[in-house]
Amino acid sequence: MTPYAGEPVTPYAREVVSGSRFRGAGIRIAAGFLFAFGLPFLALVVWGVWSTRSTNRFFPGPLTIGEAFVDTWVGRAFLDDVLPSLYRLGLGIVASIVVGVAAGTVIGLFRWLRELLEPLLEFFRAIPPPVLIPVAMLLLGITDSMKVVVIVSGAVWPILLNTIEGVRATDSVMTETADSFQITWWERLWFLVLPASSPRIMTGVRQGLSVALILMVISEMFASSSGLGYRIAYFQRNYLIAEMWSGILLLGLVGVLLAVAFGLVERRVLRWYHGMREVTRA
Amino acid sequence: MPERSTLLRVEHLRKIYESATGDVEAIGDISFTMNAGELVCVVGPSGCGKTTLLKCLAGLLPPTSGLVEMDGSPVRGPSPAMAVVFQEYGRSLYPWLTVRGNVELPLRHKKLSRAERDTLVTDAIEAVGLPHAARSHPWQLSGGMQQRVAIARAIAYQPEVLIMDEPFAAVDAQTRADLEDLVRELHTTRRISTVFVTHDIDESVYLGERVLVLSNSPTRVQEDLAIDLPPERDQLTTRALRRFTELRTHVYDQIQRAKLGQVAPQSAR
């Protein structure tokens, strides 16, 4: 059931991507830049113009927010709030990937284990992780590990379930090949099972990232004395509206950076997969 | 010691697939032996259990009864003495590895030094004529080239028997002729014992030193035919020989008879 299985690779389709890659690269980069940033820029302009005509103090203009952004986040707050948040987020993501891929691989490899655990996993996945925050607070206190646990409790599921599915769907002929050459268990894991399921694993990680960001903010809003979520909640309660919006802006930027970083990693890890799909489509 | 010793012995092999809707007898009763260095083609009507036979030989399927013996000891699972080239090259090669990586993978657990392993890999890739593609990924190659990679992987493994399951069924006629010549060449230069399963009568006669014709289900050996064509074979001249035509007609007849044997009430048993 892997997407590439059985699809005939067009003969003589090799080197499809090398020829035209560098031609007109300048134009394409410029066009790409325009496409990527054109609409955000336009939205900013419209917002700026609109805010000059509005007196609603809950919706300040972009300039006010930009000023608040620099005042609020450049300097000490970066160390006090932004870095701790990023630290928790990073730790939570890494732990989710490790736990999700490891457990997912084991569960995916054994059919009986899969059938045994599936109903339970579906149940746990259905629980919205924020309801666990009070419980986690009780058990772990108001600590970084509590927040990491909350992040993992939400972000691990898409990774886990996608890994199970990816491992389960490893192509039967590829497995038979490994059997016939008596590939050892570790080699099989490293050279067959994990690469074969890597497209699904990456899909899971992509979904997990956005969940992790959400849970980072929520866990900090609940119980914290530092962090982006804590700071934004603080601004809200104190009617520091422009500062609050600047925090939301920062969250959006963190999300975008996360997506960009993920995209870079994915392109490296799944180069074979994208290359193969390009050839198949040609 | 005789020049050619028995390498592979199959005795009363029988395979039944059990399923909830009823048992399916894939192989009735097959017996044959194969000498070291031989190239044996197995041919039979479609659906006669060729692939099942091959998987039993390779130790990928346990036989229901009977015996597969390799060098005098029974085959109970995949063994380092055998390498399989599958029909579906696209699913048998690992797309995340380069050509070199694919050929090298089965050698990793063999106790070889780095240099020995490298030599084997390089040599195998050269033997199939792909030294320029060693760093490519399989999906960057044409179908015929991919099957060459699978063959390189099998010969680098240094098996005693090379088992090929309709390896050229999915490539075009031109490529097929080239790959047939590659198999002949590897066989004559390296004396690799080969079991070549095919449904193509011409191919079996052109390649084989012996052709095993299988009957329709329940599968038996319909005929064990020695191919007395000269060892130097060539797509044009060999196929134009009168003897070639005779043999091919004979095998064709046997297969037709095998198909009819299905209608005759158990006459052969």
Image (cartoon, coloured by chain):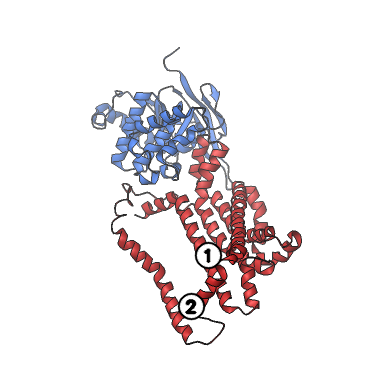
Chain colours: A red, B blue
Q: Is residue B155 left or right of residue B26?
A: left
Q: Residue furthest front?
A: A75
Q: Is residue B252 left or right of residue A110?
A: left
Q: Quadrant of residue B36?
A: top left
- Circle 1: element type: helix
Residue lying furthest right: A138
Q: Which residue is mark 1?
A: A255
Circle 2 chain: A
Task: Find disc 2 in the rendering and name its residue.
Answer: A63
Nearer the observer: mark 1 or 2; the answer is 2
Residue at (66, 69) in percent of width and height: A221
Disc 1/disc 2 C-alpha distance (Å):
22 Å
Check the residue under mark 1 and report the chain it is in.
A
Q: Secondary structure at mark 2?
A: helix
Q: Is the residue marked by circle 1 packed among few (<14), some (14-19), or many (20+) residues within 10 Å?
A: some
Residue A212 higher or lower than A44, as above or below: above
Label 2 Cα crowd, 10 Å radius (few <14 / some 14-19 / many 20+): some
Identify which amino acid the numbered label 2 is placed on: Leu
Q: Is residue A11 above or below residue A185?
A: below
Do we see residue B45 in this rendering?
no
Q: Amino acid at mark 1?
A: Gly
Please indicate whether residue A225 sits to the left or right of residue B194 in the image: right
Tell me where residue A21 appears, x and y as whole percent.
Answer: 32, 54
Q: Are marks 1 and 2 on the same chain?
A: yes
